[in-house]
Amino acid sequence: MKTIWLHENKWEDIEAYLEKKKTIIVPFGSVEQHSKHLPLGTDSFVAKKVAEDAGRLTNTLVAPQSWFGWAPHHMAYPGTVTLRPETLTAVVEDICQSLIYHGFEKIILINGHREANLPPIKIAATRLRNKTGAFLPIVDPFYFNSEIGKALRRSEPGGIGHAEEMESSHMFHLYPELCEPAEVAINIPEKHRFLQHDPFIEGDRVLSSSDVNSYREDTKGIGIMGDAMGASSSIGEQYHKKFLENLMELIDFCERDVTVNLRNREIPL
């Protein structure tokens, strides 16, 4: 292949690729407010860059990233675009079903919209897994890169959430020209112990939904949930390096150890 991007290849290139390899990376993101220091496309930019770098390091095809995700609470701020959850599920299903039809067996879904996109994506992946037999692991930073996140964080409990130190550090490293480090802020609201938003706080909790009508107030009118004051490009570089190491290991696992027998290779209609 001359390029790892699916859409930059010719159909003959994809046919030749499939004779040797059955894995492809498919990134998903979101266009939503990310406070005053990060661009609206943060989640999509991160998903694209992680997928692109891993694809080049492993010579694995990468599908073009899907820009929009499920982000109704961020509609409290201008510029946010949200899909309905059932729309996102349908998009994931149709993209992956198309790839499965051509013979891709292992489809690595990169979710740049940390945890928020997971319900619609998991529904699609589960349906496809049961219908086609394809292997569709979902890579979400909250879970996939959690160990390095815990090790690198500088903030107090409650400091990880949205547009905070880890997300900001990653963007400061990857796309410094789109960021405004001088605008970083902190917002750690008082919460009942069952209502913590920081995934690294241990303890019992419930899962709750954000309300667009109160989200602007909850995020102090600037759009941040957590603490971005300790964000730095150097932390982002370490975070990204570990992310790629983990993703390369997953790609190798898919190629060597995952056996798939495809069924129902139908065209999505």
Image (tube, rainbow, N blue to C red):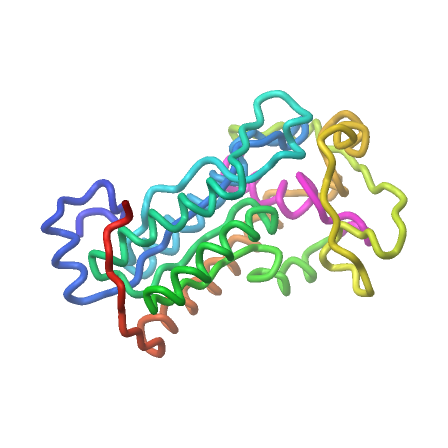
Say which of 224 and 53 sits in front: 224
Residue sticking out furthest to the left: 12
Q: For the point 17% across and 59% down, which residue is it?
A: 17
Residue sticking out furthest to the top: 78
Q: Is residue 61 found left or right of 199 in the rendered image?
A: left
Taking the magenta stretch, the answer to whether it contains residue 122 is: no
What is the total number of numbered labels drawn onto the structure image? 0
Say which of 79 and 73 sits in front: 73
Residue 204 picture location, percent across and down: 82, 64
Q: From what the image shows, is residue 175 above or below residue 60?
A: above
Say which of 124 and 18 sits in front: 124
Q: For the point 35% across and 79% down, which residue is it?
A: 257
Residue sticking out furthest to the front: 269
- The span shown in magenta is 154-176
Q: For the point 42% across and 48% down, which residue is it?
A: 27
Residue 107 picture location, percent across and down: 36, 59
Q: Is residue 21 found left or right of 141 in the rendered image?
A: left
Residue 211 picture location, percent across and down: 74, 35
Taking the magenta stretch, the answer to whether it contains residue 163 is: yes
Which quarter of the rendered picture does the C terminus lie within? top left
Q: From what the image shows, is residue 64 above or below residue 256?
A: above
Q: For the point 78% across and 30% down, which residue is it?
A: 214
Residue 256 picture location, percent across and down: 32, 77
